[in-house]
Amino acid sequence: MKLLYMSCFDIAGSNGPGVNEYETVRELLRRLGEDVRFVIPKPSRHLPELGPYETQFYYLYSENGGTAATRVLFRKKAMIRAFSAACEDFKPELLLFRPVFCPSGQIRCAELSGVPYVIKTLGKGVMNPFGKRKGLKSAAAPLLLKHNKRLMRRLLGGASAIDVSTTEYVTMFSAMFPEIKDKLHLIENATNTNMFRPMDQAEARERTTLTGFTPIIGYTGGSPYTRGGRQMIESAPLLEKAFPNIGIVIVGPADDRLKKAAAESPCKNHIVLPGKVPYEQVPYYTNSFDVCVSFDTITNIASGGNSSQKVRQYLACGKPVLSSGGINTAFLTENRIGTVINNSDSIEAFAEGAIGLLSLSEVEKRAVCDRATAYATEKMSVRKAFDDRFAIWETCLK
């Protein structure tokens, strides 16, 4: 199979989509070697591990260059130019798209190629990226959303197969575009279980300069304030009472709310906000923790389910997870690898759940580690996800 992959996400980004696409690139190179090419934005930072494969990349533009308006204006032209060069050099047998908002460029590329194409990781973000923004974007949103839906119908309608990361997305897109219902496949987000794996905790804490705390409850990921950071800080007095030397470590882009809450906490000396860190440092932070937090808002869980990348990383490192209740979290308690808090606004419930996991004996910690890593390797690895994808994609070429 000669595959050409196109995405508009920065694979050097440390956010969820960036990590997802970086691992996609690495896995496709591992599986296909010379039989894969990539049409992507130029990474925002140097990725030396991809150096030997430089000739297999065709760059669209730099995501960090210019304004949002100019990037949108030139994206379609840049996409078609890079795609055409890749097709002329490579002669692909199958195209793989990560869809974008208003995908006219991807539609045109598919038309130019004349070969089958498949779509990975379709999500709600490509249907409405505006959210609750104000000003011009808000005023123009209804027209743009209507235009985007027309374009998305064309792109999805022409695909041979489409994968989504949650059962809620299967339901949502089946209702939105009934004609693609039989093309939809559930493939949940996955993690690199070679990169995220158990390691010596003392060494990890040395690397992350967290040696002054025992135990540590931690978070890694985007939007930390709304995804567990608030509860971690507000529960700090209760956690400190149970564990006088506890560390509360929140890794990710800290907004003003998070910084203010940390600065005003009576336990501020126990709270560490490293900010956004490079992807390759995340396994060391995760292995520094004794318990890992993954909360989300009720609205997000209800509309898109939960296929959280961070939960997969936590479990691959053998860490018990403290999660908010909702869709797709029951497996944590069923497999005894985490605790689910159904009342995510209750600081007392949060603290109780955290203290329970932090109080595990060394024997219990090892047992959780073994169960968590086994579960992640069997069900949540990048290799497993792409085994499933390739089984689907190969039927598109028959």
Image (tube, helix red, strand yellow):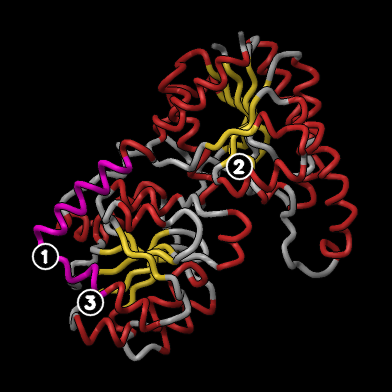
Tell me if residue 379 comes above or below residue 142 in the rendering: above
Label 3–label 2 contact, CB within 8 A: no
Expressed as whole percent of the image width and height from the top left, the position of residue 105 reads: 78, 32
How far apart marks 3 and 2 lie (CA) works out to 37 Å
How far apart marks 1 and 2 lie (CA) works out to 42 Å
- Between 268 and 44, the one nearer to me in the picture: 268
Tell me if residue 288 comes above or below residue 53 in the rendering: below
359 within the magenta span: yes
Residue range of the region highlighted in magenta in the rendering = 355-376
Residue at (48, 24) in percent of width and height:
28
Q: Amino acid at mark 3?
A: Ile
Residue on which disc 2 sits: 9
Q: Amino acid at mark 1?
A: Ser
Q: Which mark is residue 349?
A: none
Q: Horizontal placement of 202 versus 51: left or right? A: left
- Between 117 and 199, the one nearer to me in the picture: 117
Whether residue 77 can be seen here: no
Q: Earlier in the sequence, mark 1 or mark 2?
A: 2
Residue at (73, 19) in percent of width and height:
84
Q: Main secondary structure of the magenta part?
A: helix
Residue on which disc 1 sits: 361
Element under disc 2:
loop
Residue at (51, 26) in percent of width and height:
389
Element under disc 3:
loop
